[in-house]
Amino acid sequence: MLARSGSVFSWTRRALGAAAKTFRQQHTLPELPYAATALEPVISGEIMELHHGKHHATYVNNLNAAKEQLQSALQSKDENGVIAIQKAIKFNGGGHINHSIFWNNLSPNGGGLPIGALLEAIERDFGSFDIFRAEMTAKTVGIQGSGWGWLGYEKGKNRLVVTTCPNQDPLQPTTGLIPLLGIDVWEHAYYLQYKNVRPEYVNKIWDVVNWDDVAKRLSDVQ
Amino acid sequence: MQIHHGKHHQAYITNVNTALEGLDDLAALSVEDLLRNVDQLLSIMVADMPNHSLFWTIMSPNGGGNPTPEVAAAIESACGSLEAAKEQFVTAATTRFGSGWAWVVVDETGSIQIYSTANQDSPIMQGHTPILGLDVWEHAYYLNYQNLRPAYIEAWTNVINWEEVARRYAAAKG
């Protein structure tokens, strides 16, 4: 009798623990660090609400669902299932990672120039801030289809690099670079306001870049 | 529609013409510049323009309904039923992560296939003949549907010009 109730108790405890662990692993949509309209006139409140509240939220929800499927496939040793879900994890996980960085990369008090160690690194690796900004603008605008432009940090060589990734491919797992500053050029990031004129959007977004956040990301990894 | 046709499609055409102008003096270009220009030119000529040119023709304000009997038979032969084919098409269009197109094509064996491609990649690149295509780049639907791509796909089936699809099918088979 004691043994049976003991085992029911421990089973229940294990089940609750597993459920709690799963719940704790659920990703949640981070809040915007400012009001949706705060980045106007560079990015409209309408875009921010859709971009954050719909697109990013969908990546979070779909990532959670994909991870549950992965968990289930791993537990039942379903190798085909494990492999089949990878695409959704990369896409939605990348989307969640990228956008979580993006909201903090931007600020209503942003713009201007970086200072200190970040500026020194930019000048060292690109020649000047203007040269860096021109390169990142050109490469980001030139992305075919959907993707992101990135300023990344190459740890092994201690240098800054400008590159791009397609779709929602996350920078670090894809290239090994640490993401410092990302510019989203999926059409949903600018279309309602800029229509097909992607260059205007990318040129304007420099006015809201949060250099403090970019600098912190660099100092965190050095 | 005005922006999609008058701006995006126009831009592709302008870019091709510009690239062609730049190739007047081939001898003066470095090998790298030549490759760069030709690559972009090819990419636009092979895909961007034909994709959109096809797109405008397979839509109509009087569209919708069902495929013509010959096309329906071919689709049923490949997919089992029209319902199954529609589901396959909707899935292809919905699960194209990023920019791209969903297609119904006649393949090298003369059979129907349904799939999606990335960006402006065309079935022509694999030797297939597209008879119906749906643009799922965000610019194709965002002003009306925002993030709700599935709603766009569903609504779009009401403007399919099946007469034109049938004409393209016959041309592909003939």
Image (cartoon, helix red, strand yellow):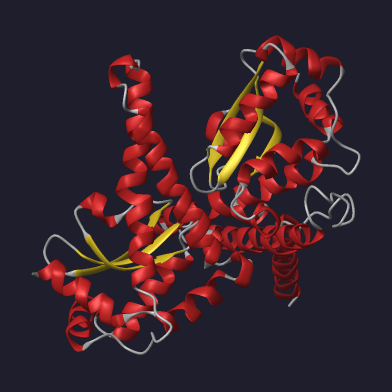
Q: Residue placed at 52% from the left, 68% from the top? A: B1
Of the 4 image quadrants, the one containing the C terminus of chain B is: bottom left
Q: Position of residue A10 (x, y in %)?
A: 73, 66
Using the image, determine if residue B37 lies above or below residue A165.
above
Q: Is residue A200 left or right of residue B2?
A: right
Tell me the quarter of the picture where residue B168 sits: bottom left
Q: Position of residue A200 (x, y in %)?
A: 67, 43
The answer to which of A87 and A113 lies nearer the viewer is A113
Counting the numbered discs, the total is 0
Using the image, determine if residue B168 lies above or below residue A187.
below
Q: Residue placed at 36% from the left, 53% from the top? A: B49
Tell me the quarter of the picture where residue B88 sits: bottom left
Q: Is residue A134 left or right of residue A144?
A: right
Q: Is residue A75 visible?
A: no
Q: Residue placed at 35% from the left, 38% from the top? A: B41
Using the image, determine if residue B138 lies above or below residue B168.
above
Using the image, determine if residue A210 lies above or below residue B24.
below
Q: Residue placed at 74% from the left, 19% from the top? A: A129
The answer to which of A40 and B27 lies nearer the viewer is B27
Tell me the quarter of the picture where residue B91 sits: bottom left
Q: Is residue A148 visible?
A: yes
Q: Position of residue B44 (x, y in %)?
A: 37, 45
Q: Position of residue A171 (x, y in %)?
A: 60, 36
